[in-house]
Amino acid sequence: MPDLSKKFCTQSIALLTLVHFCICSILPSQAQDNVGIGTNTPNASAILEMLSTNKGLLIPRMTAVQRLALSGSAANSLLVYDTDSMCYFFWRQPSNAWISLCNSGSGGTGSNGVTGSTGTTGDIGATGYTGATGATGSQGYSCWDTNQNGINDTSEDVDSNGFWNTNDCNAGVAVPGPAGYTGSTGSTGYTGATGFTGATGATGVGATGYTGATGATGSQGYSCWDTNQNGINDPSEDVDGNGFWNVNDCNAGVPVPGPIGTTGYTGSTGTMGSTGRTGFTGFTGFTGSTGRTGSTGYTGSTGSTGSTGSIGYTGSTGSTGATGPGTICGGASINYVTKFTSPTDICNSIIYDNTTNVVIGSTTPFVTDKFSTYIAGSDNGVSSYAGGSGEAIYGNNYGTGRAGTFYINNAANTSAALFTQHENANAAAAYSLNNAAAGAGTGDAYQGFTAQSGAAALWGQNTNSSGTGIMASGNNQSTLFLTNGSGGAFIGDITGIYGGFNTGGIGEALYMDDNYGAVWNAGYWDGSSYYKIVGNGSVSTVVPGIDDKNVLLICPESPEALFTDYGNGQLKNGFTHIELDPVFAKNIVVNDKHKLRVFVQLEDNENCKGVVVKNKTAKGFDVMELDGGTSNTPFTYQITANRADQQMEKGRVAHYADLRFPYAPVRLEKSSRKIPVRNTSGEGLKSPIRK
């Protein structure tokens, strides 16, 4: 019996040898970075080219459930065939969705559309490498080198001019010497392999390209209920008799589900804006001071004197008392505190005491004044002096009233109701303190009120050329101020200055100007739109310079309200789609009136044919290479769009989309004022000093 195992082994070896020979015959003989199946010259731009006139390419086939299971891990442009819908699908990023290559619609299969245009002819293969140049033949001898030793001998310089040339040949007659030996011809370099001829592009049958010219529409296929295929909804074809012709009328009234449509793109969730800081609680209005108690009404007239009673009996004269220290003056009056006008005379003082009130300069004090003075002329009502560490005047109310009130009851008097003065350059002329424990109370250290348009509830003026008018600090911070002074210096841990406005008309939170016509408005509302800062000059920022000095960068500005964004992209076979940032897209307006402006800068590839931007919307745009180019050129882009109008609180709408050269705010009128000189002694702001 023959040995079948040896026969089988021999046949296997022969088969493997044949397969190896076939593979080697199919693949090109030289090293290259692409593969051809059915051709020895795959197109240089393709990593794989398959050429056949009687075979096709089978893409992986799977059900819709199997395809959808790949969604989480599918690579961009992954292609599969869905056996349920009998359509090709490819995975697209950043949309993160399967895109069907079949036309939508529930009708039957339409007739074939027009044949796509013939693909562009493949690129001509690269020219084969030029063989290396053959070695140069050996150099022949010069005509003057008579001994052919290759050296310029002295005897060979026939004309004795120190140069060896053809004039030294044949006894000074310039005739050519014998030709040098011709060098052997170098071996011909290997002829490079002929470059691969690009395969003719296949007839276009792929998915409809991105918006270009729309191809002719194929004739409409017949609906599944159109059993006689006459294109008319016949009564007999309304199987369920409900007056509608649809898939429920197909297959004898049994609804047949159509192919599952692709899931629509889920829009990305917009980023949640940060919660705005809680606005400051408005100040509680100050409680007005209690009005002063009115003066006591006039005492009614004294009633008529009763009749004089009968005179009583005259008593006996008492004994004479001892002589007193002095005599009472004839002008003494009741309720006056007495004083010695001489060592022996007693008379009235200026102090009046009615046992309820004590008063100087009047006999009719306010009933609520336990002690008061009424002084006319230029004298002071009350003066108090202290020479130690105590208070010159001290008031303490441990009830519910004030510790002191200063009041001028004369409309013609322009003096201040309270005047304080200090001679120490480092001390305060006035000091006010709310000494309650720290908390959330509303007690102020100082309150000021006025109803005059040319006045201020709080006014400070520093007459020093480097002084500061008003300083204020909050949040338990130390006060900072400019060395050269300013109108005001304000500091806080969180907010240095708070400003706002409540008008429904034109207004701003902060207004500034100079004496040369320049105006700046911050937080400005012109009745239609909001502006963060409006004013003369340019918007700029500060950056370090090369000489350790800061320099300015100045912002470009526009007559319209525009938003700008930048990004990177790359063509894929001559096309790409750019999705706008969703936050950017939410705040712009793009329509026929307000165009999206796109500026593209190609990078790295000088052979790109150029690009065109198409299909611009508020969500994105397409970039397509010109002349049917298929490069993978990277690029950067800048986009500019009009800012969208913004809905504010209380029904207000801030308009931005249609702004173009809006009118600037007008300069506000202003007045000038200085603290008037209150001169009572020729010393300017000072009052007379009495020690």
Image (spheres, rainbow, N blue to C red):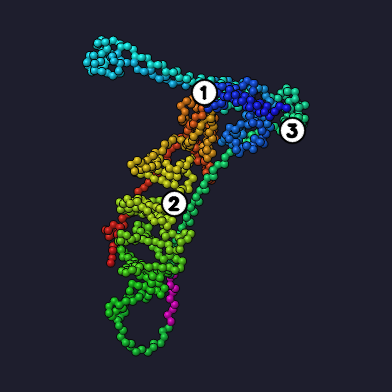
Q: Which residues, given as a range, are shown in magenta?
A: 300-309
Between the residue at mark 2 and the residue at mark 3, the CA separation in whole angstroms equals: 69 Å
Q: Quadrant of residue 140?
A: top left
Between the residue at mark 2 and the residue at mark 1, the CA separation in whole angstroms equals: 59 Å
> In the image, is residue 136 above or below residue 568?
above
Q: Is residue 540 at all visible to an observer of this figure?
A: yes
Considering the numbered disc 1 on the image, is that residue within a helix, a strand or a loop?
helix
Between the residue at mark 3 and the residue at mark 1, the CA separation in whole angstroms equals: 48 Å
* 346 magenta-colored: no
At 28% from the left and 63% from the top, the residue drawn is 689
Q: Is residue 211 at all visible to an observer of this figure?
A: no
Quarter of the image that includes the C terminus: bottom left
| Label placed on residue 627 | 1
Quarter of the image that includes the N terminus: top right
The residue pinned by badge 2 equals: 495
Q: Earlier in the sequence, mark 3 or mark 1?
A: 3
| Label placed on residue 255 | 3
The amino acid on which the numbered mark 3 sits, given as a three-letter code, is Pro
At 56% from the left and 22% from the top, the residue drawn is 40
